[in-house]
């Protein structure tokens, strides 16, 4: 059974572990090497801790299997552990992110997808998101900005 709930500080390590592994699956070979070098497994923990207040986790049998993070009108992160892909968790998390953006009074949500991540792009398109074209997402690391080629997807409510 899949349970969605707000993340708690105690979930930080589990969220970071899912994020680090799934990020590598979807981003390696599609983002600048400069970003890969700084996105070490260890780098995800402080980023996860900072985002806990805006994060919802999906639990399966008491274990964090995925998460969604919302920041204002952006569905900033949606990641599912490899062993839970294809189970419907991603769709539930994405719908929860959409619900949160709409509940905050926004008429649309947006998210960035790395241009080369065809699997993610198909998922968002099947979920009713529209590709509004390419743009450069600005990934931050220790005060440095790294441009990442992405597509901006939007869903209007």
Image (tube, rainbow, N blue to C red):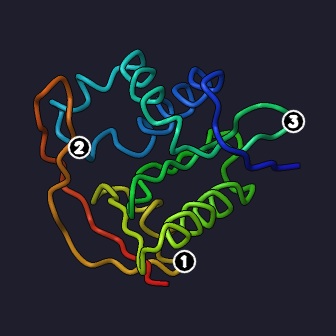
Q: Which residue is mark 2?
A: 31
Residue at label 3?
A: 61
Of marks 1 and 3, the one in the foreground: 3
Of residues 130 and 6, the one nearer the viewer is 6
Q: Residue at left 31%, top 26%?
A: 39
Q: Residue at x 72, y 46 (%)?
A: 5
- The residue indicated by pointer 1 is 126
The location of residue 65, given as percent across then percent down, is 69, 39
Q: Secondary structure at mark 1?
A: helix
- Mark 1 vs 3: CB contact within 8 A: no
Nearer-N-terminus badge (1/2)? 2
Chain-order first, disc 1 or disc 3? 3
Point 54% across, 46% down: residue: 79
Residue 87, how many percent across, how many down?
Answer: 75, 55
Mark 3 to mark 2 CA distance (whole Å): 34 Å
The answer to whether residue 87 is above or below residue 38 is below
Crowd band around label 1 with a 10 angstrom C-alpha radius: few (<14), some (14–19), many (20+): few
Alpha carbon separation for disc pair 1 and 3: 28 Å
The extreme bottom residue here reads: 157
Q: Quadrant of residue 136?
A: bottom left
Could you tell me which secondary element the residue under label 3 belongs to? Answer: loop
Q: Position of residue 37 (x, y in %)?
A: 23, 23
Residue 66, by quadrant, is top right
Q: Which mark is nearer the camera, 3 or 2?
A: 3
Left/right placement of residue 98 relative to residue 73 reads right
| Among the two numbered marks 3 and 2 on one chain, the one whose residue lies closer to the N terminus | 2
């Amino acid at each position: 059974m899949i349970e969605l709930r707000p993340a708690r500080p105690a979930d930080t390590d589990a969220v970071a572990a899912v994020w680090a592994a799934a990020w590598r699956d979807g981003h390696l070979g599609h983002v600048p090497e400069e970003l890969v070098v700084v996105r070490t497994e260890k780098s995800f923990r402080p980023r996860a801790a900072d985002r806990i207040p805006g994060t919802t986790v999906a639990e399966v049998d008491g274990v964090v299997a995925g998460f969604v993070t919302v920041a204002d009108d952006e569905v900033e992160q949606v990641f599912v552990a490899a062993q839970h892909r294809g189970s419907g968790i991603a769709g539930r998390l994405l719908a929860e992110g959409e619900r949160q953006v709409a509940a905050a009074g926004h008429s649309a949500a947006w998210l960035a997808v790395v241009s080369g991540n065809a699997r993610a792009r198909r998922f968002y398109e099947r979920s009713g998101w529209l590709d509004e074209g390419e743009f450069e997402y600005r990934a931050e690391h220790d005060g440095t900005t790294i441009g990442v080629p992405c597509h901006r997807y939007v869903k209007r409510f």
